[in-house]
Amino acid sequence: MVNVDWGPVVVAVVMFILLSPGLLFQVPARTRVVEFGNMYTSGISILVHAILYFCIYTILTVAIGVHIHAG
């Protein structure tokens, strides 16, 4: 039986949902630095959220080592 590590997959999916620009927050926003729940986005906001996503994902999967084994 194959032992599969689902930790990185679960972390990626949850972070993709939570860090979507405009869903919970947007950095930078149209009129302020941070706006919450505005459901709008811009190119620079997508770039900032992508950089945040990469940094947090790397910390969680490599440095902390989140593992979920199924099987």
Image (cartoon, grey):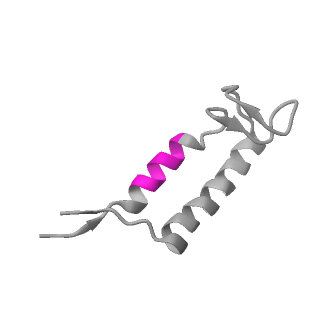
Measuring 40% from the left and 56% from the top, which residue is drawn there?
Answer: 9
Q: Quadrant of residue 59?
A: bottom right
Q: In this view, does 70 lie to the left or right of 56?
A: left
Seen in the picture, residue 64 relative to 23 is either above or below; the reply is below
Indicate whether residue 19 is drawn in magenta.
no
The image quadrant where one finds the N terminus is bottom left
Q: In this view, does 42 lie to the left or right of 54?
A: right
Measuring 26% from the left and 66% from the top, which residue is drawn there?
Answer: 4
Q: Which of 41 and 8 is in front in this view?
A: 8
Q: In which quarter of the image is residue 36?
A: top right
Indicate whether residue 11 is drawn in magenta.
yes
Residue at the limit of the structure toward the right, as seen here: 31
Question: What range is drawn magenta here?
Answer: 10-17
Seen in the picture, residue 42 relative to 4 is either above or below; the reply is above
Residue at the limit of the structure toward the left, as seen here: 1
Q: In this view, does 59 lie to the left or right of 4?
A: right
The image quadrant where one finds the C terminus is bottom left
Measuring 51% from the left and 41% from the top, which residue is drawn there?
Answer: 17
Q: Position of residue 55 (x, y in %)?
A: 64, 62
Q: Where is residue 56 in the image (x, y as percent from the top left)?
A: 60, 60
